[in-house]
Amino acid sequence: MQQVVHVDLGERSYDVQIGPGLIDQAGDWIAPLLARPRVAVLTDETVAELHLEALRAGLAKAGIDMVSLALPAGESTKGWPQFTRAVEWLLEQKIERNDIVVAFGGGVIGDLAGFAAAVLRRGVRFVQIPTSLLAQVDSSVGGKTGINSLAGKNLIGAFHQPSLVLADTAVLGTLTARDFLAGYGEVVKYGLLGDADFFDWLEQQGPVLAAGDMAARVEAVTRSVQMKADIVSRDETEQGDRALLNLGHTFCHAIEAATGYSDRLLHGEGVAIGCALAFELSSRLGLCSQEDPSRVRAHLKAMGMKTDLADIPGELPSAQALVDLMGQDKKVVDGQLRFILARGIGEAFVTADVPPPAVVEVLEDALTTV
Ligand SMILES: NC(=O)c1ccc[n+]([C@@H]2O[C@H](COP(=O)([O-])OP(=O)(O)OC[C@H]3O[C@@H](n4cnc5c(N)ncnc54)[C@H](O)[C@@H]3O)[C@@H](O)[C@H]2O)c1
């Protein structure tokens, strides 16, 4: 059942191994990268409790020693205080230039540990062992690393590609249903942005995949990673095509900011709602058919996911206030908002040519149904 996706980036190329049981084999996969048989693992307390001993055993089988630091679970870890703690800890552990740092957790740990590896001794190599669905299909691949600032999300960071990614699909079994579905929001995004057949497949297979079918999980992770790898290989530092991966994210970042990056809305939930809004906007601008946004929403609803602004608990600001929050988005160029819109399912494109009143109108209508 094991699959591999190659991320082709010249001398920074690497493989993403995908399948159940990779943690048990972690030592065999990582050993060829090591100058000495010792790694430093950064993880979070939830993942540590559930899976760290399995990783220790998997590494020990290949004679590799492991030291580990477990940070608190959750987005608030992705800031300067825990980042400083992690980097100082890596130095205390005498991690040298030729050593390997392992990121073992969801996107929070992957982003923080990757950035720590990027700056430690001016850059050490790291291995991603993503444990959430979101991290397996998105954040562990492509080399974007970083932390949040008081001014906004992901504003401090570096491009630093991992040397290897081990996506063990068996660990997804311990995710809460909510975290699993949040990750599924990113999976749907891939179908919507560039692969209509994949979206058709998800409409059929989504329910069995969510229920735990391993072959379907491996297939969904592999197709998602393959699409991300292709896009990243064409445009590593987001000068063009890579922005397609941000389908739904302009809306998502605004509603995440409006909900204070809190438990009210997880990132992947915001992406799903954002994709539905991006298709609604595309349809109103006459770019895609009216059926497309309905089909997107129907699939999200069938999966039991948040689909509309009304599904977010608590108050939301006005449509104009949400548009103002979009101004903080990293995709703003010369003060002009860029959107990822679609000519149909699987046909996304990047544009700065969106009349602001149309965005306000879509949000106003979405808010009045709240
Ligand atoms: N670098 C990128 O390209 C990129 C892309 C997308 C998202 N991100 C970032 O990823 C982060 C979100 O990632 P996330 O959703 O994985 O969040 P997360 O790391 O907070 O993980 C979500 C929750 O799941 C728990 N968890 C993880 N694996 C588990 C497992 N196997 N069993 C049980 N619980 C488990 C974690 O402890 C946490 O409580 C955000 O900070 C976002 O900015 C980065």
Image (cartoon, rainbow, N blue to C red):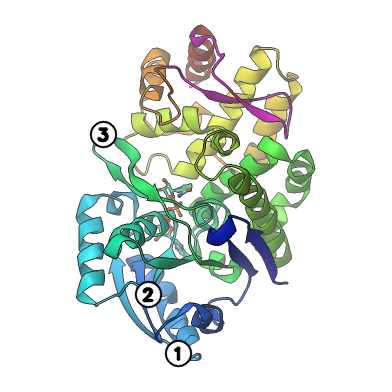
Lower position in the chain sequence, tag 2 or tag 1: 1
Q: Name the residue type under label 3.
A: Ala
Q: Quadrant of residue 334?
A: top left
Tag 1 residue = 60
Bounds of the magenta segment: 336-356
Q: Amino acid at mark 1?
A: Ala
* Number of the label disc, if any, that sits on residue 151: 3
Instruction: Give the number of the disc on residue 98.
Output: 2
Q: Mark 2: few, some, or many residues within 10 Å (few <14, many ≥20)?
A: few
Q: Residues within 10 Å of mark 1 (few under 14, many from 20)?
A: some
Pick the front one: 273 or 125: 125
CA distance for labels 3 and 2:
34 Å
Horizontal and vertical percent for residue 221?
64, 57
> Eyeballing the image, is 232 above or below 367?
below
Q: CA distance from mark 2 to mark 1?
A: 20 Å
Q: Left or right? Give the position of 321 relative to 14.
A: left
Above or below: residue 315 compared with residue 56: above
